[in-house]
Amino acid sequence: MSMEKRMRKQPVTVKSSLFLKGAAVLAAAAVFSKLLGTLQKIPLQNIAGDGAFGIYNAVYPLYLLILFLATAGFPIAVAKFVGDRAAVGDHEGARRVAAAAALLLTGTGLICFLLLYFGADSLAGWIGTADAAAAIRSISYALLLVPVLSVLRGYFQGYQNMVPTAVSQVVEQTVRVLTMVLLLLYLTKQGAGDGDISAGATFGSVTGGAGAMLLLLFYWQRSKERRAGSRAASKAAEIPDRPDSGDAPHSAVNSLGRSTADKPAAPGEAVQAEAAVSAGAKEPFGRLMLSIGAYALPICLGSIMTPILNLIDAFTIPRLLLGGGADPAEAMRQFGLYNHGLPLVQAVTMVASSLTAVLVPAIAAAKAADPAQLQIRTERTVRMTGLLGLAAAAGLASLTVPVNVMLYQSEEASGTMALLALTALFGTLNIVLAGVLQGLGAVNAPALHLLAAAAVKIGGSLLLVPRWGIAGAAVSAVLAFAAASALGLAEVRRLTGAPERRRASALAPLAAAALMCAALGALQFAGGPLLGAATPGLGPRGQASVLALAGVALGAAVYALALLRLGAVNRAELEQLPAGGKLASALTKLRLLPQGERP
């Protein structure tokens, strides 16, 4: 049997399995790398203090925003255009797509580098401290490397090979964190100032990008060698050249996510493919760059809500604190305190962002196949996200004092941290709702919601920071994310035709969250003094760590049990989770899960 016939006989389920496995690998790597990238802020604060921590958190959102504007959406766009060409055997055209995208992003990366490097002093002045200039120049070099990374990742994803992207993400974050920690230890030992220390911390993005670039170039070279060997073998066997296994498991994927081997070739398909290959190889670079940019832009705009809001904080909070009478050093220290809660909130929301890798195609498939299933799938996804976000927000808000001491050695600004914890609920909802809206084809809606959230954030900060300081900034953040969530929910209901849920349906989750908060309050009220008397050798930070970790376990148990006993989660919702069927059966036997369905 020929290779072509063997490929045609592969079942569609195998292709779907390969796609889902690839998405799972990518999601797992994203969770690990984002967790590493988020939690690296904790040793920065512990080693360097809140002054350098504040400068770092003022500079890094600026870099992230420029990076997102320059690259976000391009891996998806490149994957789509590469997949379209590879689907008809136009591998030369696929490489031209990568070359055109690399040329486009190298140009934008160079422009952004020049703007950051030579505008560092002005930007630092806008932030409110001249010490930020060194960190801005330090991180600007990453813009010469990272844009090309997004092109290479998109190229491999176009061939369904998710491993290079996943491994490069892990390598990038690992090298970045190691560089940051080593430079922190060296610079603090040398007695460097907050500006130089924050510059050393931001330089990790440069070395991380360089490490990931070298790895992806290795994968690129290996795929070229394998492709050359495949062509030689095909020619020797007198069979058509097929996509290389280094680039794809067995076949490419077109723009609809279907494998090219899912169906037998129609009469004349080979002639059409040959014509497409010939036309694709001659496609002008300029037209390719315009097409790729036009496709990536809406995706980019939908993914920059968090960087935009963080950047608004960086440019408003320190200056508003300065206007209230604080000196530059104290303003940056206060801004560092404000950012104590953000790594934990981001650790929660990153789980939601990893879900969008499989959420968008799942929603798109349901929309095309079964509108009724679309409504059910969308409602359950949003509801389960809300339940997880509510647990994270309520739990973190209840444990802010021991968590603050455990991570940052101080109770200072725990109230602000508790307020920011509430953004975990709305942040996770926003990310998932953006994925749902993209799957429904409403790619511009998240960008409009972002504009509304930015307006609320700016107005809230201008009004509340002069009155309440960093606590006012936290309140404005909650209001901004809540506004975007409300708009996203309304748009999803409009597009899916889902009826508005009764208010009573929210009472059970809210009651479960209230019970969890009560249990965590009792743990700290009674357990704190007992733990202090029983383990004086642990010290305040050790005791806070025990309370915080015990609180996480207790809070999760109380919340889950309350949801089950109050009927807030039904069997169908549990079964959509990994191993959910077995879990639902076990809970039913233990009489923790009601037999009836929640209305």
Image (spheres, grey):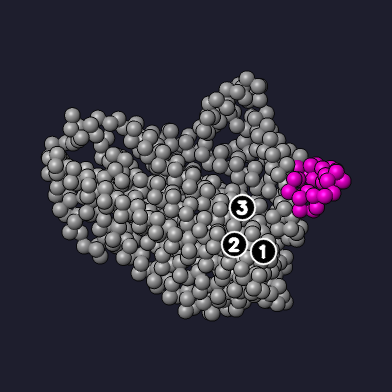
Q: Which residue is mark 3?
A: 345
Q: How many marks?
A: 3
State the CA–CA distance, disc 3 to disc 2. Answer: 22 Å
Instruction: Please identify the quadrant where the N terminus is shown.
Output: top left
Residue type at numbered disc 2: Val
* Residue 181 marker: 2
Look at the numbered disc 3 and give the secondary structure of its residue. helix
- Compared across the picture, whether 271 is left or right of 38 comes to left
Look at the numbered disc 1 and give the secondary structure of its residue. helix
**Mark 1 surroundings: few (<14), some (14-19) or many (≥20) residues within 10 A:** some
Residue at 31 percent across and 32 percent down: it is: 12
Seen from the viewer's position, the closer of residues 413 and 55 is: 55
Q: Relative to residue 180, is residue 482 depicted above or below? A: above
Helix, strand or loop: magenta stretch: helix
Residue type at numbered disc 3: Val
Instruction: Identify the mark nearer the N-term, 2 or 1.
Output: 1
Q: Could you say where residue 114 lies in the image, as x and y percent from the top left?
A: 43, 75
Q: Which residue is mark 1?
A: 47
Residue mark closest to the camera, 3 vs 2: 2
Residue at 68 percent across and 61 percent down: it is: 46
Regarding residue 56, the answer to whether it shows in the image is no
State the CA–CA distance, disc 3 to disc 1. Answer: 21 Å
Seen from the viewer's position, the closer of residues 479 and 580 is: 580
Instruction: Identify the mark nearer the N-term, 3 or 1.
Output: 1
Q: Could you say where residue 392 lies in the image, as x and y percent from the top left?
A: 64, 45
Asked whether residue 544 is drawn in magenta, I would say: yes
Q: Which residues are magenta?
A: 520-547
